[in-house]
Amino acid sequence: MTEEFSFDDRRVGFTAGQTVGAALVGAGIRSWRTTRVEGRPRGVFCGIGVCFDCLITIDGVPNQRACLVPAQPGMAVRTQEGGGRDQLAV
């Protein structure tokens, strides 16, 4: 592991070329989103960007697919609750 980003105030290491989802799974984190209606945990399902189970908030932007976003040093990654827009004034 050569670089790190933060996930819910926890440091997560990754290697160049890994996605955020791959780094989280590699760190033993299996879920980082809850569903809108029942609050069920979700994480990587397909791993190729087809489904939307791995949605996550990255640097304040909700609904990012963790399986597609390349991990970058210093990213602020947060668990996404529900639709991910609760904190936005829209």
Image: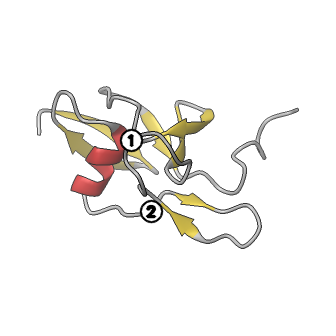
**Where on the picture, by quarter, is residue 31?**
bottom left
Q: Position of residue 47 (x, y in %)?
A: 37, 47
The residue under the point 32% across, 26% down is 72
Which corner quadrant holds the N terminus?
Answer: top left
SS for dot 1: loop
Q: Residue lying furthest right in this view?
A: 90
Instruction: Residue under label 2, please give it.
Output: 31
The residue under the point 42% across, 49% down is 9
SS for dot 2: loop
Amino acid type, residue under disc 2 in the picture? Ser
Q: CA distance from mark 2 to mark 1?
A: 16 Å
Crowd around label 2: few <14 · some 14–19 · many ≥20 (10 Å): many
**Where on the picture, by quarter, is residue 68?**
top left
The residue under the point 54% across, 68% down is 41
Crowd around label 1: few <14 · some 14–19 · many ≥20 (10 Å): few
Q: Position of residue 56 (x, y in %)?
A: 53, 45
The residue under the point 20% across, 39% down is 14
Q: Is residue 52 left or right of residue 74?
A: right
Amino acid type, residue under disc 1 in the picture? Ile
Depth check, mark 2 against mark 1: the one in front is 1
Q: Is residue 28 left or right of residue 90?
A: left
Instruction: Residue under label 1, please give it.
Output: 48
